[in-house]
Amino acid sequence: MIDSKKGVLVIILTYTLWGFMPIFWKQLAHVPADEVLAARIIWSFILTLVFIVLINGGRQLWLDLKSLWASKKKFFLLMLASFLISANWFFYVYAVSHDRIVETSLGYYINPLISMLLGAIFLKEKLSPAVKVAFLLAATGVLILTFSFGSLPWLALGMAFSFAFYGLIKKTIRLDALRGLAIETLFVFPFAIAYYVYLFSINRVSFLQLGLPTDSLLLASGLITAFPLLLFAIGAPLIPMYMIGFLQYIAPSLMLLIGVFIYGESFDVVKIISFSLIWSALILFTSSKFLEARGIRRANRKVSV
């Protein structure tokens, strides 16, 4: 019970940190999103590698790499996952720096439903009637936004689909969260370094050019990326999956509040209607998963008796 309470508190802290992330990335709005992405990759890799070495995890990291290389399919799937999470980071940073924080919250609200859909398509997971209705409600909300904007909310959809496909791949590859982040950023690290060299060559770089505050923020991007993942790795094993599924909505809810009340982004009647449909979908989806998990636990207790 103590471990379970500790897990809940750690996961709440994790999602709260993720929810407040727009405030940090907003401080880098003057730096192009492509450079922020490159910096995030570079410093995430360096920081996680140093931390792994400090906790004597270097040998296990090497064994993980050897194991992945022995199974070429897993190796290249994880490489694909690294490009997907990089795309997700880019969409997110771009959205925040272009005053579209509300759209980032939309992306993370609909992500669980996209993940369920991909699970049904690729893993042949059965969708319950409640989940099907939830998906239709969310799709209706997105369509209303599309007709209102005159175009698809591509940043939200890009974030949702990139993270959902990333999660789909990660489902098939078991890796420690911290070492997994090190390996994923290792795959794209050479590209990030090469891109920084290119930026320096054309004199379009912000790092080491705009002063200590900007440099410090770019350096901190690695810590901002890695620390919540480390917390998640600590807390997630201590609580059931349905609880994680319920708590994950803390982050987009905070993003929405930050976008509207701190940065004054628009939240008009059309968005209220669209988000209401999506919230209804999430309530239905989460409730069905909660009841399903409770039913499984009761069945297991009966079997054990």
Image (tube, rainbow, N blue to C red):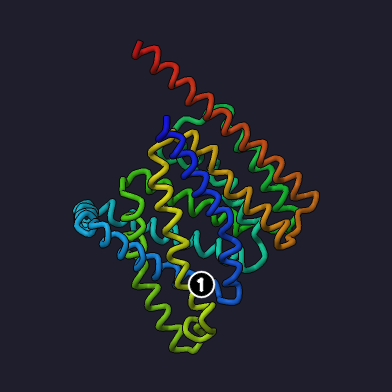
Q: Residue at x 70, y 45 (%)?
A: 275
Can residue 124 be seen by looking at this rendering? Answer: no
Quarter of the picture holding the C terminus: top left
Can residue 265 be seen by looking at this rendering? Answer: yes
Read off the residue under disc 1. 217
Choose between 57 and 36: the one closer to the eye: 57
Q: Residue at x 57, y 65 (%)?
A: 24
As helix, strand or loop, the secondary structure at mark 1 comes to helix
Residue 184 location, x and y as percent? 35, 59
Q: Amino acid at mark 1?
A: Leu
Q: Quadrant of residue 132?
A: top right
Report the residue that reaches farthest toward the front: 2
| Side of 15 relative to 263 (left or right) | left
Residue 28 location, x and y as percent? 57, 72
Against 273, residue 298 (above or below) is above
Q: Residue at x 24, y 56 (%)?
A: 57
Against 208, residue 172 (above or below) is above
Q: Quadrant of residue 110?
A: top right
Choose between 93 and 226: the one closer to the eye: 226
The number of discs equals: 1
Q: Residues within 10 Å of mark 1 (few under 14, many from 20)?
A: some
Quarter of the picture holding the N terminus: top left
Residue 173 location, x and y as percent? 32, 47
Report the residue that reaches farthest toward the right: 269
| Side of 197 relative to 260 (left or right) | left
Against 165, residue 35 (above or below) is below
Residue 154 location, x and y as percent? 61, 58
Against 266, residue 218 (above or below) is below
Q: Residue at x 63, y 51 (%)?
A: 254
